[in-house]
Amino acid sequence: MMDYIWLIPLLPLAGSALNGLAGKRFGKTFVSWVACGSVGLSFAFAIGAVLNLVQLGPGEREVVRTYFTWIASADFIARAEFLLDPLSAVMLLVVTGVGFIIHIYSIGYMHAEDGYYRFFSYLNLFLFSMLVLVLAGNFLLMFIGWEGVGLCSYLLISYYFDRKSAGDAGKKAFIVNRIGDVGFMLGMFLVFATFGSLDFGEVFRQVASAPVRFPVETGFGLLTAVSLLLFVGATGKSAQIPLYVWLPDAMEGPTPVSALIHAATMVTAGVYMVVRCSPIFSRSEIALAVVSVVGILTAWFAATIGLTQTDIKRVLAYSTISQLGYMFVGAGVMAYSAGIFHLMTHAFFKALLFLGAGSVIHAMGGEQDLMRMGGLRKFVPTTYRTMLVAALAISGIFPFAGFFSKDEILWSAWANGHPVIYLVGLATAGLTAFYMFRLTFLAFYGEERFTAEVRHHLHESPPTMTIPLTLLAILSTVGGFVGLPAWMGLGANRFDEFLKPALKHTRLAEAHDLPHGMEMIFAVISVLAALTGIYIAYRLYVRNPGAADAVAQRLRILYRLSFRKYFVDEIYDGALVCPIRDGAREILWKGLDALVVDGSVNGAGRSIRGLGAVLKHVQNGLVRSYAAWILLGTAVLLYYVAKLRG
Amino acid sequence: METVLFYSLAAIALLAAVNVLVQRRVFYSALSLIVCLTALSGVYLLLDSPFIAAIQVIVYAGAIMVLFLFVIMLLDPFSAEALRDKRRYLGYVAAIAGTLVFVMLVPLLDAYSLSRVPRTPESVAGDVSSVHKLAQVLFNDYLLPFELTSVLILVGIIGAVVLAKRQT
Amino acid sequence: MGPHHYLILSALLFALGAVGVILKKNIISIFLCIELMLNAANLSFIAFSRYLNQVDGQIVVFFVMVVAAAEAAVGLAITVTVYGNRKSLNVDDADLMKW
């Protein structure tokens, strides 16, 4: 089975090619079968591969398959090699599993679209790129996947290409990602320069086994530089401060795209990369601090914006940014498996939230404004129930999946010596619960704020959409049980144990001997914070519907800051985009290109023409002047002959 | 003796040449040229080339110049050239160029003065003024060019006839 | 008497002929000046022939005269034709040799 690992990414690629080339001709059923079939098979193979992996002993769970040597040039060798270890196994299952579920959902959601085949072709292409990224055994191959998912993100965000806003959003995503990618590339170059190889195994072994050459850096050193550069790439791909601005706009794409790419998989690539490179990150104090601080700031910042947004998908977008911040906090406080755990549970409930939102939008005939919804739970019961499960999960209510993962991160933050991060994280958890239930209450409870014709149109979604919702709801409920913490008395955290071998080169946190009871108390505090948030949301949106507006009026300035996303887009536009764009137009285009380049080319032509105009008088047809020129020439020649003769 | 002859003949030749330029009517220019050529023939005699001197008078002054005169007579012989030249600059160019050419030629030609160039041995050179010798070299070493010149003259005749034929 | 005298005379005659070619406006006058230049060259050849004691110079003069004759014949034939068309011997009027 291990020899067939290459099929896992290649099946979606084949599906993408087939749908892209022949999909238009063969109709929607064909496209659906090819697309979902390839992903389904890929998922099956992934399960098989992971089962095989588990059969190996805990210390041997690292399988490398090299397929061909891509570049062999002097010292630089890049191979196409896949690495399957516990970390990539988790990612593999999440990507193929959730991806498969979302593909099924898309059959129903996109059935009315003209570009059906194009959608599935891009979606499969995305899965291929993501799988390459996850399975890559070296930096270069991972970068290929990295770029590929960026490309597919652009293609899918601007899927509705006849809308200017969609095209702009796609461009914004791609360009902002690109900025991050520069950091990633520079980091890659530095890795190669330092270690002489881009192979994960080689690099991490070198870092771990040479404490003199690669000590733990408290100041600014080589490893810090590498980590920070790679992290820039992660902020771009995983939408952290300062490169998160593309994610809210990316909601222009179809909702399954938002679910798959901008919730469950692509945006988690940054987290995966940081954890994969944890051998390097963990040996740089500054890098760890930067990662956790950026993570928690982003988590808080995005949560405050999500409080006031009215577009259902925007709320979820900011929620994603916020939860990604949590994952980075996990990586930054050296709770790597906690970060990955949250990545996994987040994939379940965030995908569920987006797909549910899609179901709501579908039912409402395209309406996305929360203020025009209300009381929908009578009309779309399955959607309502599954979204409620997701909301509970994301808020971190026991026993749903989000509780275990979020709690582990918060506890690790405290236990590994970052109390401030813990407090901010706790507050953010409260905010998360609040805005998620604000969304739930505004959409499903209260008075109906939609028009009569929308009411007419309201219907529950077809099974192709509701079954995936149900599946994800089940996963959001039981998904946390793979990582039951030790204090529950059922043995050590299985998820942690599973991931440990993948982190063998990583410098781990010092063991703390805080009692389990303390951990339990912290868990209770988290749940209380979440319940507080839910209660406040209940009071503001269910019991007292006008109260929210009153609060907004009282805190006018804060409300405005939150609603207008702290004007970050405007600031970027003014400080960066406009100067670059206008500078390019005025200086580079009008000045350099038109004046200098065109000028010199045209000027050369003009001067030659002028020269010609002067010289043409030599040929005046006058025999006598020709004779005169001949004579002059003869004189010159004679001069030279005389000179030669001496 | 030689010097006196040379200088007088040279003077005649030069004055005649200048007159060629100066005369406004082409007929008088041609006559001046005949004088010049005849003077040159005398110079050739001074240079021990009797054959060439004779040829000069017979062919050049006698045949070619007569041909010129025929054509001049045919075509408006006494039209006066305009005094004012519309293109004055040509005059200056000509003056400069002519001076330059003269200035360049002299040292060039001087390079082959006797003191620098090795003289050929007497036995090989033979008597330069002998027509016999001339004929020998002409019809032995230079036979091909000789035959070619006869072809050239033939071509010239045909060409002249064709060109000047009256178109009917 | 060295060859220099003859050579200077030759150079002078040549320069005069060259100047005349440029200055004269009647086409036949130009021909005459060309003949003058040819004769100057002949003089050079003869002078060298005498002073290098070789007969080749005179042979060259022989050929030069032949060529001059042929050239004069053809050139005058052209002149006659052109005069027939244009009725002008002014060389400035024949200025079609451009572009």
Image: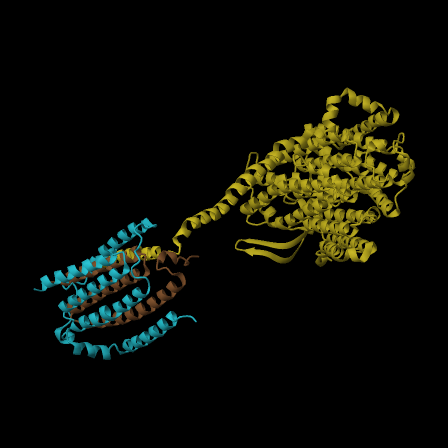
- Foreground residue, C70 or A30? C70
What chain is colored brown?
Answer: C
Q: Position of residue A24 (x, y in %)?
A: 78, 55
Quadrant of image for the N terminus of chain A: bottom right
Q: Is residue C74 above or below residue A350?
A: below
**Identity of the residue furthest to the left in this view:** B1
What chain is colored yellow?
Answer: A
Quadrant of image for the C terminus of chain A: bottom left
Q: Is residue B39 above or below residue A162?
A: below
Left-right relation of B53 to A263 = left
Left-right relation of A264 to A333 = right
Q: Quadrant of residue A301?
A: top right
Left-right relation of A90 to C23 = right
Q: How is the image coloured?
A: by chain
Q: Position of residue A69 (x, y in %)?
A: 60, 57
Left-right relation of B9 to A354 = left
Q: Position of residue A491 (x, y in %)?
A: 78, 40
In this figure, what is the number of numbered marks? 0
- Foreground residue, A408 or C30? C30
Q: Is residue A10 above or below residue B129?
A: above
Asked whether the viewer can see residue A60, the reply is yes
Residue at horizontal 31%, vertical 68%? C71
- Foreground residue, B113 or C7? C7
> Which shade of the palette goes to chain B?
cyan
Q: Position of residue A437 (x, y in %)?
A: 82, 31
Asked whether the viewer can see residue A510, the reply is no
